[in-house]
């Protein structure tokens, strides 16, 4: 009988220690899930920042293209005026007037196409930015859900382990 009593508390203590070890491992897993979710959420936040930069860059590209198109238009008109003047063609009538009108129409179409293209690209980037925000929030929420499972399991195992050691 004396031998059984001396073995039994030792067995309970060992089981309690194993329970505590399991609890600590579960807690560690829970905190690792939190850290992982936080890192993933930060990555999505960084993606949103890059999308903001890309949107600004696209706006700048559109403005630069518009400036280029206008400069080209004015160079073409100036060159044409010089050519027509050299041939003795009046600038406000006939072929010179039609050329200027057509060149201006083409410029307006090019500017409009440039603006529409830029808006389409910016819209795509805005959608991607919104998706990154949603993914960021989802990653954070899933991290909390995954971590809560490990943390609660770990806490329960620790309590059980401590209770087992006490008895």
Image (cartoon, rainbow, N blue to C red):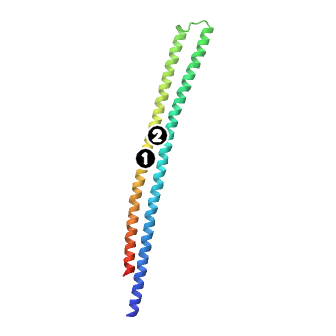
Of pointers 2 and 1, the one earlier in the residue sequence? 2
As drawn, the label of residue 25 is none
Q: Residue at 47% of width from left, 49% of height from top?
A: 44
Q: Is residue 50 left or right of residue 15?
A: right
In percent of width and height, residue 160 lies at 37, 74
Q: Is residue 9 left or right of residue 60?
A: left
Q: Residue at 55% of width from left, 20% of height from top?
A: 73
Q: Quadrant of the N terminus?
A: bottom left
View extreme (front): residue: 166
Mark in the foreground, 2 or 1: 1
Q: Are marks 2 and 1 in contact (CB under 8 Å)?
A: no
As drawn, the label of residue 125 is 2
SS at mark 2 in the image: helix
View extreme (bottom): residue: 1
In percent of width and height, residue 53 lies at 51, 40
* Total numbered badges shown on the rendered structure: 2
Observer-nearest residue: 41 or 100?
41
Circle 1 residue: 133
Mark 2 vs mark 1, CA separation in Å = 12 Å
Q: Residue at 44% of width from left, 63% of height from top?
A: 31
Q: Quadrant of the C terminus?
A: bottom left
In percent of width and height, residue 94 lies at 53, 8
Q: Residues within 10 Å of mark 2 (few under 14, many from 20)?
A: many
- Residue 3, picture quadrant: bottom left
Q: Residues within 10 Å of mark 1 (few under 14, many from 20)?
A: some
Q: Residue at 60% of width from left, 6% of height from top?
A: 88
SS at mark 1 in the image: helix
Check the image and report above or below for 80 versus 155: above
């Amino acid at each position: 009988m004396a031998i059984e009593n001396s073995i039994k508390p030792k067995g309970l203590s060992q089981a309690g220690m194993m329970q505590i070890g399991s609890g600590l491992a579960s807690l560690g897993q829970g905190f690792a899930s939190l850290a992982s979710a936080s890192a993933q959420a930060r990555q999505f936040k960084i993606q949103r920042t890059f999308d903001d930069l890309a949107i600004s860059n696209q706006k700048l590209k559109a403005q630069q293209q518009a400036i280029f198109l206008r400069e080209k238009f004015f160079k073409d008109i100036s060159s044409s005026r010089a050519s027509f003047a050299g041939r003795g063609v009046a600038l406000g009538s006939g072929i010179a007037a039609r050329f200027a009108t057509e060149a201006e129409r083409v410029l307006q179409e090019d500017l409009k196409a440039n603006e529409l293209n830029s808006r389409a690209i910016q819209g795509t980037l805005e959608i991607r930015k919104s998706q990154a925000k949603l993914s960021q929030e989802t990653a954070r929420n899933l991290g909390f859900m995954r971590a809560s499972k490990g943390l609660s399991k770990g806490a329960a195992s620790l309590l059980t382990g401590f209770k087992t050691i006490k008895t």
